[in-house]
Amino acid sequence: MKNIIKITASLFLIFTLSVSVVSAQSWSVPNLSKKKQNPYDTSTKNISSGKKIYNINCKSCHGDATMRNMLPLQPVAPSDLGSQAFLMQTDGEIYYKVNKGNGAMPTFKKTLNDESKWMVITYLRSFDKNKKVSKKIAEVKNPEVSDVKLLLDINKETKSVSANLTGVTKKGARVALQGIELSFKVKRSFGYLDISGNDAYTNEQGMIEIPFPSDLPGDREGHVNLLVKVTDDAYYGEITVDRIATLGVPTDPENPLDERAMWGTRANAPIWIIVSYVGGVLSIWSIIFLVLFQLIKLPKLAKTEE
Amino acid sequence: MKEETSNNSRRKFLKSVGLSVGAAGVVSGFSLLGAAKAAAQEPGETVNLLTQDGQLVKVDKNQLRPTVSEPLTELQKRGREGIAGKSFVMVIDLSKCRNARKCMDACQNHHQLRTDQHHINVLQMQDAEHTAPYFMPKPCQHCDNPPCTKVCPVDATFKRQDGIVLIDNERCIGCRFCIAACPYSARIFQWTEPKDAEKYKNLTYNIESNVPQKKGTVSKCLFSADRLREDKLPSCVSSCPNGVYYFGDRNEDAVTNGTSGETVRFTKLIKENAGYTLMEELGTKPRVYYLPPKNRAFEFNGDLLNEENLH
């Protein structure tokens, strides 16, 4: 049963995605739009926030930049946005195409704001080999390290989570890693809720402190599953720590069946309905029986009269 | 004499048990062999499947078969109880809907419905003469004060602890009181034999997906309760290409977008976007919330734009 659903779902996905035909005409961009410049600078922060937006909005079709793992659509597969052939275009051209959409590529004119679009372009530009984007490396200089460790500290009084990112240098000393973005996530039923905020970068001591939202529900005891991760796997591979923290608001799950209500089934019907219904049935039957008894009594009465 | 017969019958019984156990062994052996043979057979018809890591693989159709599900009693019991500690809600962002209708297709595939039967339907709306038209997907609202369960004379439709309103095909007598009671027209009636009735014939009835469908009974949106049990989003939610649907647990105050997978705070989403529910004045307390069709991602291209269709 489960498999059937999975199979039908995946078949359906493949079918629907491959049906949307892309018109393979050349995609011309007006000259004026081509000249548009990216107003945001190529900083680590912009690149990583661009990557986040990319992963949510672009990755499902285009795959990871430079990895060539886009969806195999027909007749035209989405292009690898990290490829040099794509990055030949000016910022303005990419911006125009993201706004307009074409064929199976939807328009992002209103789904993404301008800042987000430029962030994505900044992120994609970081793969451009022709454009010397040395800022990314120059901004924060961390020594080459191995055995990267992420330590978590949960402070119940201030309701905050702090993390410490360190690594061992070649000389064997453990040093702090600064300027690295971390993601703080809370597990929910169908996904992870990001609570990192906009500025989750480690400082000179490799430390970062994030306030936990004061009104986020946990379970009955207030436990939440916390996951902390180095946002960009490209730096040190995938580094994650998960922990059960007692920072959430203790929440008793509401059970609508606890109360007796009109909409409830027999077991949950309001008392007054049960009483009045049963009372009604009983009184009607008792009247019927009363009449029957009187009828039985009639012949006897007739006899005594005689 | 009497004793002998009883002895006889016991022997017979033991014999038959032995035989049937043996036969079961042989049968299972055969089915294993059969599976192996089927696998070894020349690939006949193949189907393309997308694996979880995004690889396209070709699979022989012979190897695809329905999995054995739990027995009916277990399915009925857990279907009635629901998932403890959850309180499911859906948020539909009208500004993102462009009538792609993928939700409807996925739903009809999941629940054995023909293309003219809707658990979820995308409607073209125009609230007043001079207001802008928009598309509105409309599933069952899974009300917290459901009018439909009040009128059912046989306890066939009911609300579970996680807030989902379901129908039990096994109990439904087809009186259609619930259809009349529902102000959202969320329910459908199976007038004829359902689609692919032959194919689904031997499947155990699952109350959480209402499959197999039964002629003469009522059916409606179930929030894909069987998928929720596996921590998966409902079929319509995960099949939307435009990020229209959010689905989640109100107890956790989080909803997840079916398209982007992004998880956001439920209260914040509703507050910031002025979320509303349908026909609040009826006091049905729906669990499906709508975000107004403001700053639309797509132009409205429906029939309502033509003058002829307006009146």
Image (tube, grey):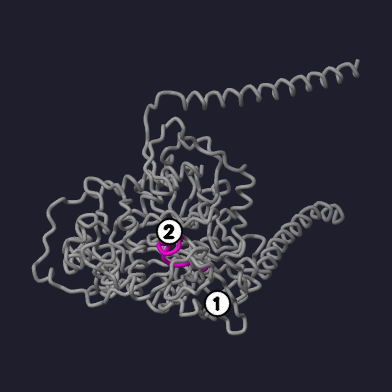
Expressed as whole percent of the image width and height from the top left, the position of residue A87 reads: 21, 61
Is residue A6 shown in magenta? Answer: no
Expressed as whole percent of the image width and height from the top left, the position of residue A228 reads: 51, 68
The label on residue B186 is 2
Q: CA distance from mark 1 to mark 2?
A: 45 Å
Q: Quadrant of residue B81?
A: bottom right
* Dots 1, 2 in contact, CB < 8 A: no
Residue B106 visible in this rendered orientation of the protein: yes
Which residue is at 11% across, 60% downward? A28
Q: Quadrant of residue A216?
A: bottom right
Q: Choose between A203 and A153: the one closer to the eye.
A: A203
Which residue is at 60% across, 48% downward? B75
Q: Residues within 10 Å of mark 2 (few under 14, many from 20)?
A: many
What is the three-letter code of the residue carrying label 1? Val
The residue under label 1 is A161
**Eyeballing the image, is A171 above or below A23?**
below
- Residue farthest front in this picture: A171
Question: What chain does badge 1 belong to?
Answer: A
* Secondary structure of the residue carrying numbered label 1: strand
- A12 on left or right of A83: right
Is residue A232 shown in magenta? Answer: yes
Expressed as whole percent of the image width and height from the top left, the position of residue B149 reads: 55, 60
Number of disc labels:
2
**Eyeballing the image, is A305 above or below A154?**
above
Q: Residues within 10 Å of mark 1 (few under 14, many from 20)?
A: many
What is the three-letter code of the residue carrying label 2? Ala
| Stretch of the chain drawn in magenta | A228-237
**Eyeballing the image, is A140 above or below B177?**
below
Q: Choose between A272 and B127: the one closer to the eye.
A: B127
Which mark is in front, 1 or 2? 1
